[in-house]
Amino acid sequence: MNEYSNTSLKVKVSLYGNAIIGSKNISFPKFRRELRAHQIPLPKNVVLWGTYRAVDRPMYILGYLIEDPSLTDYTRDTSIHGSTYYYKIYRNKETVFSDILVPLYTNTYLNILDIKFDETREGPEFLAYINKSIETVFSSLKTGDKFDELVFDDIYNTGLNIADSCFESNGECNYLLPVDTLSAIIRNQENSNIGLDQIFKTFTSFLGEPVAYTDSDQAKEEPVHRHKITIDSLVDTIRDEQVVMFNENHFAPQCRLLVNLMLDRLYEHGFRTLALEGLADDDDRVNSTGFPVMESGFYTRDPNMANLIRVAKMTGFRIIGYEDLKGSRNRQLAMAKNIIKKTRIKKGNDVKIAVLGGFGNIGEDIDDQDRGTMGFYFKERTKIDPLTINQTKFLPRTFDDDRIEIVESSDADDNFDIYIANFLNPRRIFLGADLAYTEVDIPFKGYENRKDLGFYVYKKEEYILDRGAIPISVSYMSNQIPLKLPDGEYTCILKNTSGEVIEKQDIVVNQ
């Protein structure tokens, strides 16, 4: 549904998830009429055509074969699979063209045009948005010998592109459309797709919905010895370490909430840097404003991750992202190097950092395929033995507002120092430890049972500064719990699946 694949041309690219291509979705005569209505001449040798669903202005995609094009005005780039493409962006009044040339064979290129009509946005931010869209889509490009390769990353990136394409509506976050779109695709597939399923679960978790685990990602249920501990006692275990690393299940936001709850006490014991695998190349902006926006990363779109960033900045932490954004051959090594370079940490110096990474990335040993993890390479290169805390192996199925447990089990290997069971409720809004929280009435009466409507809560000053700010909370209107907020001004918005604002109301909490 979202992939263009042409066997004879040996070209494959994962288009945005709301792209609908081919005659089954839009007839060629209708497509031709639409372009002619906007004075766009149709070239010869058309091999690809389509449009987009759930957009606020007409958008079309056109692909055709072209011989010996001039590459003078184009920028060259390479996909994560090593396939080359060239691109440029230009406009004619209110029509914006993303123009991509894909080399196929001697002197022949596939010219793909993404055409946006009635587009009034312009300026550096809009240009950056278009550039990012091109990079997102064509990072998946596979041509020639790469065409028949299939790896898990392809499947995962397919899901990621689908979700990414649906997430922005009218310059604001839209959490409902990615879930609905992915759900429909998954239902219509003959075979299961792990990549799509994981992205679907992740976006479902952003909305505070419980995730249905499969055998591959289900928490362990064998008999184990557990004992309840407090946040303070866990901090006492960490306090004298130079580096502490927590892992997370990407669709279990309570993993981020635990780190958030510890920040103020970690700061008291000298920790000054928070390193996040989920933060993209947005360190400077996040450290300046103190909150993430849509472009800050994928997992930073989770309100719990966004609140972690807010509290870290308010507490005094410097926040860094360490993901490998260059597509290195060894991602784990690149991430370790990024942490070391950005923090300038050395064994015994006064740098103390808290790290949050995905699943096994913080492990201190090689994995089951004899490859090093980020934690392994970090330890090898710095000679610092980090305290590693695993939250994913024994992830509970139920929530409890204030319970975490140390887990001892024969299934808990030496790859991590501490295993915990995190029962924290990820629906809790936590914006700081020294704040008083007041239960407030949820606005928009009469919509309580609507699962086609999303309830978004923003910090008012953030929403004014950037409408692409990540909300402090988002959920379906049909699944509300008591809304508890610290003193401050907030903007509450009711949006439908397409991202249209149904109602908006500012509230002031003043205990």
Image (tube, grey):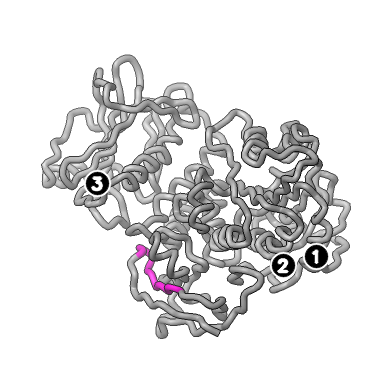
| Image-based side of 29 in relation to 341, left or right | left
Instruction: Name the amino acid type tagged 2.
Output: Phe
- Give above or below for 139 relative to 221: above
Q: Disc 1 versus disc 2: distance between alpha carbons?
A: 8 Å
- Give above or below for 489 relative to 139: below
- Which class describes the residues within 10 Å of circle 1: few (<14), some (14-19), or many (20+)? some
- Residue 368 x %, y %: 76, 36
- Which residue is labeled 2 in the image? 423
- Give above or below for 289 relative to 106: below
Q: Secondary structure at mark 2?
A: loop
Q: Which residues are magenta?
A: 490-499
The label shown at residue 405 is 1
Residue shown at 52%/83% (left/top)?
A: 510
- Give above or below for 475 relative to 167: below
Residue shown at 80%/61% (left/top)?
A: 234
The label shown at residue 116 is 3
